[in-house]
């Protein structure tokens, strides 16, 4: 599992659209598996789960992105999973790390 966190300022809707464009456009096998959008008072939580095929591992890896937005502040967590071929421990995590790097590029490249 690979993990990245970042705080940003901006509007959550254009940020999510930017993530979708960059992550889904980064691989022909990438797709959005599911998502959620919740509001409580002035807070909003948006979750996206992406998946793609990892040629390095010969399997699929997933990327979950959670965005907590309050006003113009956003806290973003991106976590990958899958991609390992071992039964009791993780080996060959290159696919996870590459998928996370695509999310990091999208998050860091967002211009509010």
Image (tube, rainbow, N blue to C red):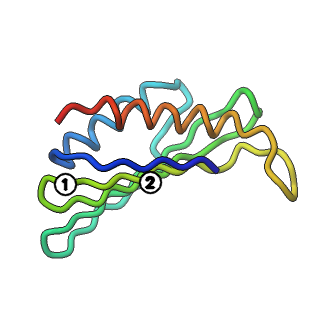
What residue do we see at 45% from left, 37% from top? 103
Q: Nearer the viewer, mark 2 or mark 1?
A: 1
On the image, which quarter does residue 73 sit in? bottom left
Above or below, comparing residue 75 to residue 99 in the picture: below
Between 50 and 91, the residue placed more toward the observer is 91
Residue lying furthest bottom: 41
Q: Which mark is residue 112?
A: none
Quadrant holding the C terminus: top left
Asked whether disc 2 touches disc 1, contact meaning CB atoms under 8 Å apart, the reply is: no
Between 51 and 110, the residue placed more toward the observer is 110
Q: Residue 63: give x, y in percent of width and height.
A: 52, 46
What residue do we see at 35% from left, 37% from top? 107
Say left or right for 2 vs 45.
right
Q: Residue 78: give x, y in percent of width and height.
A: 46, 49
What's the CA distance linking mark 2 and mark 1?
24 Å
What residue do we see at 28% from left, 34% from top? 18
- Residue carrying label 1: 73
- Residue carrying label 2: 34
Dot 1: element: strand
Q: Residues within 10 Å of mark 1 (few under 14, many from 20)?
A: some
Say left or right for 64 vs 39.
right
Going from N to C along the chain, the mark reached first, 2 or 1, is: 2
Dot 2: element: strand
Q: Residue 2: give x, y in percent of width and height.
A: 60, 47
Q: Residue 65: give x, y in percent of width and height.
A: 42, 51
Say left or right for 99 vs 84.
left
What residue do we see at 27% from left, 67% from top? 38
């Amino acid at each position: 599992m690979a993990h990245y966190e970042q705080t940003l300022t901006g509007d959550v809707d254009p940020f999510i659209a930017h993530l979708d464009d960059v992550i889904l456009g980064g691989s022909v096998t990438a797709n959005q598996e599911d998502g959620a959008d919740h509001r409580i008072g002035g807070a909003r939580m948006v979750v996206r789960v992406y998946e793609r095929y990892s040629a390095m591992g010969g399997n699929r890896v997933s990327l979950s992105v959670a965005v907590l937005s309050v006003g113009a502040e956003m806290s973003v967590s991106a976590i990958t999973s899958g991609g390992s071929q071992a039964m009791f421990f993780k080996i060959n995590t290159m696919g996870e790390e590459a998928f996370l790097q695509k999310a990091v590029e999208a998050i860091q490249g967002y211009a509010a």
